[in-house]
Amino acid sequence: MSIRALELLFFLYFASHIPITLFIDLQALLPEHVYPQQLKDLLRWYADEFKDPMMLDPPEWFKSFVFCEAVVQMPFFPIAAYAFLKGGCRWIRTPAIVYSTHVATTLLPILSHILFHQFPEKPHPGPQSQRERWLLVSIYAPYLLVPMLLLLTMLLSSTYSPRPAAGSARAKKKR
Ligand SMILES: CC(C)CCC[C@@H](C)[C@H]1CC[C@H]2[C@@H]3CC=C4C[C@@H](O)CC[C@]4(C)[C@H]3CC[C@]12C
């Protein structure tokens, strides 16, 4: 894949993450009266359709991740969307490495919970069959895969490799 195609993928990922976080994810954290009925219905539809009880009665550890999403990740989304749409912005490298490492880590407990937890049938049914577990995994998986791809791109691509400092031996050799 060309670097421009990757940048556009990252742009789409971050741009779409903004409304998803504001309108859906934060419902797991904020009091009900903050949200209009249509958005509450949308979350209910999603949670019923894909058997995601974590969003309707979130365990404390899940809430702590949504909290990170709101205060740590959310401010980064518009900045990253801008940088990747523009393309070739080296200054996004370090924040992107911090972001991708953090998010990939939060996805491990979430995915293993989806795959291995014995979900009760009430009050909100979770995935029971193997098929339902993998369906829910497929919704969360992009939030592991895209950050991993982002991390590898930042570490390996020459477009994003840091330039040696001006006075350094490496810089002098290059001249
Ligand atoms: C069908 C439409 C309307 C709703 C789709 C909602 C999906 C995209 C939402 C529901 C729950 C959300 C997840 C909730 C918690 C986290 C942990 C955080 O560290 C990274 C984002 C991540 C992984 C969210 C990604 C988006 C998510 C999977």
Image (cartoon, helix red, strand yellow):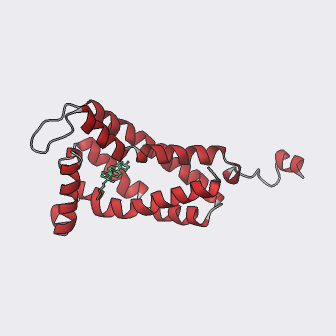
- Name the residue located 32 percent from the left edge and 39 percent from the top edge: 110
Q: Is residue 62 above or below residue 3?
A: above
- Name the residue located 49 percent from the left edge and 43 percent from the top edge: 101
All told, the count of numbered labels is 0
Which quadrant of the view contains residue 23? Answer: bottom left
Question: In the image, residue 48 lies at what x, y percent?
Answer: 18, 50
Left or right: 87 as drawn, with respect to 26 = right
Question: In the image, residue 98 lies at what x, y percent?
Answer: 52, 48
Q: Residue furthest front?
A: 131
Relative to the observer, which residue lies in front, 34 or 136?
A: 136
Whether residue 29 is visible, yes or no, is: no
Left or right: 133 as drawn, with respect to 169 = left
Relative to the observer, which residue lies in front, 50 or 156?
A: 50
Q: Residue furthest left?
A: 122
Left or right: 28 as drawn, with respect to 160 = left
- Name the residue located 65 percent from the left edge and 60 percent from the top edge: 88
Q: Residue furthest bottom?
A: 36
Question: In the image, residue 171 lies at what x, y percent?
Answer: 83, 50
Question: In the image, residue 156 lies at what x, y percent?
Answer: 65, 43
Whether residue 161 is visible, yes or no, is: yes
- Name the residue located 46 percent from the left edge and 57 percent from the top edge: 13
Relative to the observer, which residue lies in front, 71 or 9?
A: 9
